[in-house]
Amino acid sequence: MNIILIIETAIIVLFALFFIWWIIRNGLKATAIQLIVYAENTNLIGSEKMDLCIEKMIKFIPFPFRLFITRNMVKKLIQAVFDQIKIALNYQSEKNKIIESEEEEDEYYKNDHPYKQNNIS
């Protein structure tokens, strides 16, 4: 009977820890995005922007968690968020180029072109 109680308690504790980790991770991601935007709007360049983000992020983390979260971990988190933002912006840019290209093609065929779409045989 005691073994079952121990296993149930361990499962509940694991779920609680996972839930806390998930909340902290998502909160840290949102904060990282805000810090990246803030750093981009400063006059800093390159690694100075990263250092600014790292320092501010470390200040955001509650003290007990700072004992376990290293500067390198924060740097990896910020870099990962930055990479995700960059991918999203590149995707949106490519998507806009395709839309613009299609609009230009439509405009080309609307004019008095000998091969209008409705006259193609």
Image (tube, grey):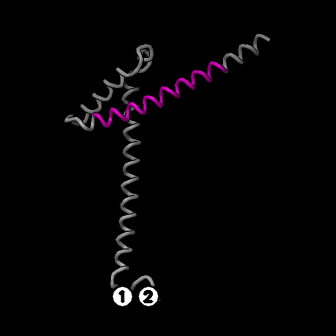
Magenta-drawn stretch contains 17:
yes
Q: Could you tell me how far apart the alpha carbons at marks 1 and 2 are, in whole angstroms?
A: 8 Å
Outermost residue toward the left in this view: 43
Outermost residue toward the top in this view: 2
- Whether residue 76 is visible to the viewer of this picture, yes or no, is no
Q: Secondary structure at mark 1?
A: loop
91 in relation to 40, above or below: below
- Who's the residue at 37% across and 59% down the image? 96
How far from the left and from the top, in percent, is residue 70?
Answer: 39, 21
Residue type at tag 2? Asn
How far from the left and from the top, in percent, is residue 112?
Answer: 33, 85
Q: Which residue is mark 2?
A: 119
In the depicted view, which residue is nearer to us: 16 or 110? 110
Give the residues drawn in magenta, as a range.
Answer: 12-38
Residue type at tag 1? Pro
61 in relation to 95, above or below: above
- Asked if the residue under mark 2 is in contact with the one under mark 1, i.e. CB atoms within 8 Å, the reply is yes
Residue 9's label in the rendered image is none
How far from the left and from the top, in percent, is residue 22?
Answer: 53, 28
- Who's the residue at 29% across and 32% down the image? 50
- Density class for disc 1 (Cα within 10 Å; few <14, some 14-19, many ≥20) is few
Q: Which residue is mark 1?
A: 114
